[in-house]
Image (tube, rainbow, N blue to C red):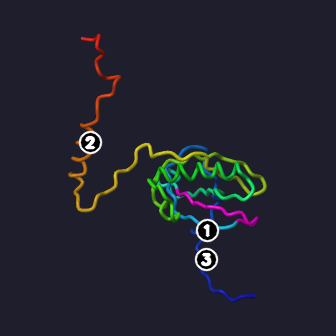
């Protein structure tokens, strides 16, 4: 028996956490590690967190094995996935997985029913943010940022579909 003093808060009890519905969510990596799994296979582990919407704060886990000792397919898939994540983060030479932390992107997840371990999500695709938030620039006012954005927008060419064709008058 262990003596332990604790006052129970009935408003702060554990809640069942269900897997996210299948779909794409704005997420970012908040934790990462590189360690061997229980079979001795080196695994890159990423913890993704939803950063907006009704599921904000929810986490999804992704494991990659780019140096799997026996499965070439696992190495190839993991390497392609890591290349995609690195590219979306603007990283050419990854030296530490913390370089990938805090960079928003869209992450597509599937819902997988698992009677043994409980339902879970599997990461299926990483893509750029549909509308990436504009970062606040140090020393600039919101007005100057808006002015810069409008200058960029006004310098964008008119899409071909909106230009008059040579035969139109």
> Is residue 152 or residue 73 the one in the foreground?
73
Q: Disc 2 designates what residue?
A: 152
Please give the label number shown on residue 137: none
| Mark 1 vs mark 3, CA separation in Å | 9 Å
| Horizontal and vertical percent position of residue 71 | 73, 53
Q: Residue at x 74, y 51 (%)?
A: 114
Q: Nearer the viewer, mark 2 or mark 3?
A: 2
Q: Earlier in the sequence, mark 1 or mark 3?
A: 3
> Is residue 112 or residue 151 the one in the foreground?
151
| Residue 157 occupies quadrant | top left
Q: Quadrant of the N terminus?
A: bottom right
Q: Earlier in the sequence, mark 2 or mark 3?
A: 3
Q: Quadrant of the C terminus?
A: top left
Q: Is residue 72 magenta?
A: no
> Is residue 68 or residue 120 the one in the foreground?
68
* 49 vs 146: above or below: below
Q: Earlier in the sequence, mark 2 or mark 1?
A: 1
Q: Residue at x 51, y 54 (%)?
A: 50
* 109 vs 70: above or below: above
Q: Nearer the viewer, mark 2 or mark 1?
A: 2
Q: Disc 1 designates what residue?
A: 13
Q: Residue at x 50, y 47 (%)?
A: 106
Circle 3 residues within 10 Å: few <14, some 14–19, many ≥20: few
Tell me the magenta residue range: 37-49
> Is residue 2 or residue 93 the one in the foreground?
93
| Horizontal and vertical percent position of residue 152 | 26, 42
Q: Disc 3 designates what residue?
A: 8
């Amino acid at each position: 028996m262990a003596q332990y003093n604790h006052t129970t808060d009935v408003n702060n009890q554990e809640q069942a956490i269900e897997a996210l519905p299948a779909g794409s969510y704005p997420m970012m990596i908040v934790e990462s590690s590189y360690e061997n799994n229980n079979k001795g296979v080196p695994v890159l582990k990423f913890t993704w967190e939803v950063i907006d919407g009704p599921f904000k704060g929810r986490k999804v886990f992704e494991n990659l094995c780019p140096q799997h000792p026996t499965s070439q397919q696992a190495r190839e898939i993991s390497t392609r996935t890591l290349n995609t994540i690195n590219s979306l983060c603007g990283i050419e030479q990854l030296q530490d997985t913390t370089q990938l932390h805090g960079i928003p992107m869209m992450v597509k997840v599937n819902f997988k029913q698992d009677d043994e371990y409980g339902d879970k999500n599997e990461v299926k695709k990483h893509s750029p943010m549909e509308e990436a938030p504009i970062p606040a620039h140090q020393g600039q006012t919101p007005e100057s940022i808006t002015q810069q954005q409008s200058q960029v927008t006004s310098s964008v060419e008119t899409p071909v579909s909106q230009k008059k064709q040579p035969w139109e008058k």
